[in-house]
Amino acid sequence: MADIKNYTINFGPQHPAAHGVLRLVLELDGEVVVRADPHIGLLHRGTEKLAETRTWLQTLPYMDRLDYTSMIPSEHAYCLAVERLLGVEVPIRAQYIRVMMDEVTRIKNHLLNIGTHALDIGAMTMVLYTFREREDLFDVLEAITGIRMHGAYYRPGGVYRDLPDQMPKYQENRFKNAQTVKELNEPRDGSLLDFLEDFTNRFPVYLSEYHTLLTDNRIWKQRTVGIGVISPERALQLGFSGAMLRGSGVEWDLRKKQPYEVYDRLDFDIPVGVNGDTYDRYLVRMEEMLQSNRIIRQCIEWLRKNPGPVISDDHKVAPPRREKMKGSMEELIHHFKLFSEGMHVPAGEAYVAIEHPKGEMGVWAVSDGANKPYRIKLHTAGIPHLAATDEMTRGHMLADATAVIGTIDLVLGDVDR
Amino acid sequence: MSAKLERLCRQMKDTFGDRIGEPVLALGELTVAIPAENYLDVALQLRDDPALRFEQLMDLSGIDYSEYTGYQGKRFAAVSQLLSITHNWRLRIKVFAPDDDFPVVASVMDIWNSANWYEREAFDLFGIHFEGHVDLRRILTDYGFVGHPFRKDFPISGYVEMRYDPEQKRVIYQPVTIEPREVTPRIVREETYGKGNGRG
């Protein structure tokens, strides 16, 4: 009998299941993965180097482009780091808006993850359902930030503007008749908060639809149970965070343990897995969506009752109001200095971590007192997770490598920066 | 939070004495510089000592201090952000590479496995060599890349650019044709600036 040697295949960089430009060099023994070597950096844009040549404010929109499927929380980590260096207080309403936006993004991120994960391992329908709900959340983002994805909405010191009073509406065209448009516009008659509240009423029903489709689905369980098992000790050793760590049974969520903004005032639970396999992580994410839904409802209730400023009135950091600027010399100078030279951040360093949908997102900002960062290091959740691919796929079949890539919730913009 | 950090600060001083630099408590964060020769011992103890128990290395990155305003000292440092899940506290440790021309520090990959890719990244971007790392390849830059792009003397535009050459019918590298453009200059103001003393 001929001696069969291991052979090596290239998975990606252009592969629909690679979630971007991941090149995975797989060494196979028959159909069993012996070694997996991810090659990253094909989407490296040098965000951290670019930040060193931009002012503190100009750096902010780059944060959206890191994890391009859940944009807003990355801005959040950056703003918190700058705020800690500056010592700026953020108005309480802005904090609630930020928390609400983060949770909207968390739902959006998990919807994408679960939809495409199911798509990757053969459940075609799932993505159609999850993308339906994502579309509603994109509408929310568009109404608030003015753009569907890369919002650039947070600012050091608050958020850019208050929530809008009305939602954009559908209009009749040759694809949508009057009756359809009327039905579609029904939840959009009120303010943004009304629309979002309507969504949070509908969402648990959608979630139960996903459970029907996947949770007890025999094929889904065959593809995910016992795949990519990580023990709690290994998860800590490998630097895991977020749902990947909780799936292994470690109860650790920065929103609870090191609360930032107003998370300590809100009521929510932390789901924890048992076996640390792909199926448990899926369940953790499903439950997290329900908890995010709860948080959003609490934020809506608070935001309805408590109007107020949404950005700091320290004009060394945040621009003055437009109408004031037109009448006052000093405000005009502030405005001009802020947008030409930019804010000066006192010398020092700060590492701020938040619970990004994918795990811990940390920003280590170093300033030497200039109007530009001296160094920004972005710790994104995807790197340690992807680095563990080798360990998670070893000994599994080739097809399970796809399940593992799906479960680590991979976005290459996040990994490559 | 700060009472807890002060406790950690005292704990660090008691445990390590003069094996580490003076812990700095600023902005609600604790930073400790560790001499390169004690790095591995201290790191191992940080992980295993039940009173400290830093199970997780969340981040490790390089930094090039050569253009830091008013700074005189070693140029390269490897900076790690540690997290203890048991005690719920964080610590930042800094280790400066003794030689500026050939920066080498020890690898903590065996202590925290997550350091693997972070150290590859710091090697790739800053040229810091990690002694004891088993797989110190480039990670983020292109195959065959020359130089360490995050060093302060590396221009933002780089040295080479890539394009498709229709005559040779392949992708070629050539010297960059763009020049770095600075819209807003980098300014460090004196400390009294904007404090309302009539001069600024």
Image (tube, grey):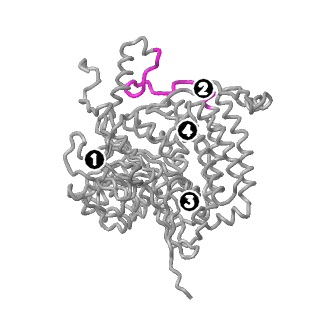
At 36% from the left and 21% from the top, the residue drawn is A336
B56 shown above or below A264: below
Could you tell me residue A177's position as x and y percent?
78, 30
Q: CA distance from mark 4 to mark 3?
A: 24 Å
What residue did someone put label 1 on?
B154
What residue did someone put label 4 on?
A149
Q: Answer whether labels 2 and 3 touch (C-beta < 8 Å).
A: no
Most extreme residue toward the right is A179
Chain containing the residue with disc 2: A
Badge 1 marks a residue whose secondary structure is: loop
At 75% from the left and 54% from the top, the residue drawn is A212
Label 1: few (<14), some or many (≥20) within 10 Å? Answer: few
What residue did someone put label 2 on?
A164
Q: Residues in magenta?
A: A302-323
Q: CA distance from mark 4 to mark 2?
A: 17 Å
Q: Answer whether labels 1 and 2 touch (C-beta < 8 Å).
A: no
Three-letter code for the amino acid on which mark 4 is drawn: Met
Q: Earlier in the sequence, mark 4 or mark 2?
A: 4
Whether A311 is among the magenta residues is: yes
The label on residue A405 is: 3
Whether A371 is among the magenta residues is: no
Could you tell me residue A268's position as x and y percent?
62, 45
Q: CA distance from mark 1 to mark 2?
A: 45 Å
Chain containing the residue with disc 1: B
Does residue A127 appear left or right of residue B52 in this picture? right
Label 2: few (<14), some or many (≥20) within 10 Å? Answer: some
Q: Answer whether labels 3 and 1 touch (C-beta < 8 Å).
A: no
